Amino acid sequence: QVPLEDIVSMACVAPFLGDGEVDLGGARNDLSGLVELLKSLKARSVTFTEVNYVVNWWEINGVWVPLKHHGVVLFGKPGDHVLTLDFSRHGIVWDYGSEAPENPDHVTVDQTLAISADPLDVAEYCRQTGEFDFFRNNCSLWTRGLLVKVFKLEESCIED
């Protein structure tokens, strides 16, 4: 098992360059690393207690695009554990640290909800994620599935 300190170091320092040398800005998209991190958090009795659901409009080369991107920031206790997750054509993109990231530009939803979630339930949901498909398996559907299936939130309490 990889020590948490090594995982944190890898997540914060070593960007993952995937297909076509895509720069994810220091975040990672390796599922095995995410699952190892979540197992390590579980071993340290961490529970996710809060989720920040963020939706923003896309901007490409400074031009607003009428498409939205959905993602979450998870906060864990005990301690300061912050895990960002979003799903894209690059897979599940994640980052881990002790501080929440700044919101992206053009935010339309910034909703914080109380949860009680086991890191292993998050890991299983991520393991079951299929390939990204713009129409059938996209960031909106994936994020809403996480909120409803894993965090047991009512669909009606999630903003659009």
Image (spheres, rainbow, N blue to C red):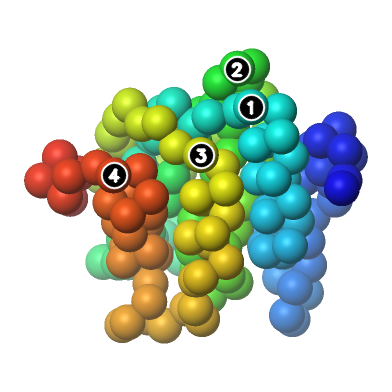
Closer-to-camera residue (4/110): 4
- Residue visible at 68% across and 55% down? 35
Closer-to-camera residue (75/90): 75
Helix or strand or loop: what does disc 3 sit on? loop
Cα–Cα gap, marks 3 and 1: 9 Å
Residues tagged 4 and 1 counted as in contact (Cβ below 8 A): no
Vertical arrangement, residue 65 with respect to residue 136, above or below: above
- Residue visible at 36% across and 31% down? 115
Q: Earlier in the sequence, mark 2 or mark 4?
A: 2
Characterize the local packing of mark 1: few (<14), some (14-19) or many (20 or more) Cα atoms within 10 angstroms.
Answer: few
Helix or strand or loop: what does disc 2 sit on? loop
Which three-letter amino acid code belongs to the residue tagged 4? Lys
Which three-letter amino acid code belongs to the residue tagged 1? Ser
Report which residue position mark 3 lands on.
Answer: 118
Vertical arrangement, residue 144 with respect to residue 132, above or below: above
Cα–Cα gap, marks 2 and 3: 13 Å
Cα–Cα gap, marks 4 and 1: 20 Å
Q: Which mark is residue 101?
A: none
Closer-to-camera residue (76/68): 76
